[in-house]
Image (cartoon, rainbow, N blue to C red):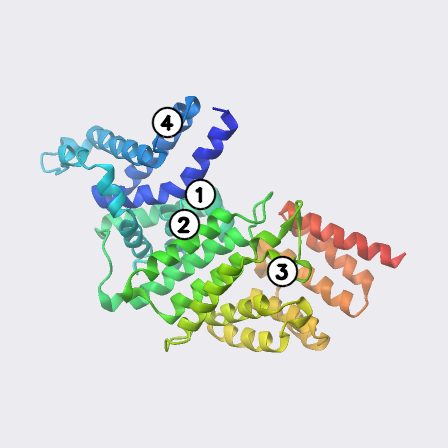
Amino acid sequence: MNTDNEIKIVDHLFRHQSGKMLAILSKIFGLSNLELIEDAVQDTFLQASIKWRNGLPENPEAWLTLTAKNRVIDLLRQSKSLKNRNANYKLDEYSKIDDVYMNHEVEDSQLRMIFVACHPAFSKEDQITFALKAISGFSGKEIASALLQNEETIKKRLSRARKKIKDLKITLDYPNPSEIESRISGVLQIIYLIFNEGFHSIKENSLIDKELCGEALRLTKLLLMKDNFRTGTLYALFALLCFNSSRIDSKILDGEIIDLKNQDRSKWYLPLIVLGQDSLRTAQMYSDRSAYHYEALIAAEHVKAIKFENTNWELIIKYYDEMYKFSPSINILLSKTIAFLQIDKYNQAKEILDLIKPKELNQRVYLYHGTLAEYYIKINDKNKAVEELDKAIDSCKNNLEIKYLKNKREILVKSLS
């Protein structure tokens, strides 16, 4: 097998399988052994990257899970705790667990792991960090990138979460019915973050990661399978993910970013749009409301418009106002600014921009400068627009977005001469 292909396959499977493996192995061996299970999964993928150079096994997913299970047993045998007569590891029983059982249990185990991640004993930051690691297989570096933190902070958060699992003897169980509502909001935030990192990544060389978007959709569908997890908010989030996913293939063309105005709308994937519309209608049948409802309504307006010029910006601005009440953020203010600029309400746009403290955007500060540049273009102050584009380029880390901003700057400079 070609080494590059082998590496890609292992990387692909790590993304898709590692979370499933952690969940099912945690159900078998207990969350108290989570760190040891993580080591076993890591060892298994390393082993796969070496052994698979001569060809893939017949069922790679089953090979990975069973190999990881056997590796956990090996590590448990080596563990000092086994010397304690009171240690109660039924290793012979574990070794008999086959892939039929694990395939049957994997989805349920992942759902349980999602709720473990949102245990109230964890801080909100630790919840999200742990979920990205244990459920979606993010590396420490990827988590740091997604959450705009350094890797050392992420390591400390993961360590805290593992320690609390041991200290509080947290098990891989669903919360009590009375706790589900409070936990589900954290679950949805995690899924939302996973999707956003895939839909608009801050990685250096890629803007879109379809696998992450697909993972977020998969996790949402898992939740929707359980009657007692269904809420208007869950359906609204699913609608939002469907609408945004429908536009993925039109965002990049020949290695260049295509903005919403210039996207080929014939490439938008209709089945996902229809699924999103159905989910949004269902969401509105429930009594609960959330920021996801209004963000989904905004996304629905975009996919509804036959042309960019047909977009109902006035309605979108109203939805941003409602969304901001549920979840105040600079990103919403920037998006609202863009909407005002589309209908030539420059004063309202500038009032919002003057309220924003760009540094609070951290690694996404370039979005502020890019929006301010758009404002100056609209009021025909092209020199200041160039200055803001320079600041956006300097603060941007993604190569595709840098290229997009440079192209925009080049067109603007030419118009000045």
In front: label 3 or label 2: 3
Residue to which mark 3 is pinned: 265
Q: Residue 277: percent from the left, percent from the top?
A: 48, 68
> Given the image, on which type of amino acid does mark 4 rest?
Gln
Nearer-N-terminus badge (3/2)? 2
Residue to which mark 4 is pinned: 47
Nearer-N-terminus badge (3/4)? 4
Badge number at residue 373: none
Task: Please rate how many residues cluster around mark 3, counting C-alpha atoms within 10 Å: few if below 14, some from 14 to 19, many from 20.
Answer: some
* Separation of marks 2 and 1 at Cα, in angstroms: 9 Å
Vertical order, 350 against 83 (above or below): below
Residue to which mark 1 is pinned: 140
Q: Residue 184: percent from the left, percent from the top?
A: 34, 64
> Given the image, on which type of amino acid does mark 3 rest?
Arg
Residue to which mark 2 is pinned: 132
Quadrant of the rendered image containing residue 22:
top left
Task: Please rate how many residues cluster around mark 1, counting C-alpha atoms within 10 Å: few if below 14, some from 14 to 19, many from 20.
Answer: some
In front: label 3 or label 1: 3
Nearer-N-terminus badge (3/1)? 1
Which quarter shows the C terminus?
bottom right
> Given the image, on which type of amino acid does mark 1 rest?
Gly
Nearer-N-terminus badge (2/1)? 2
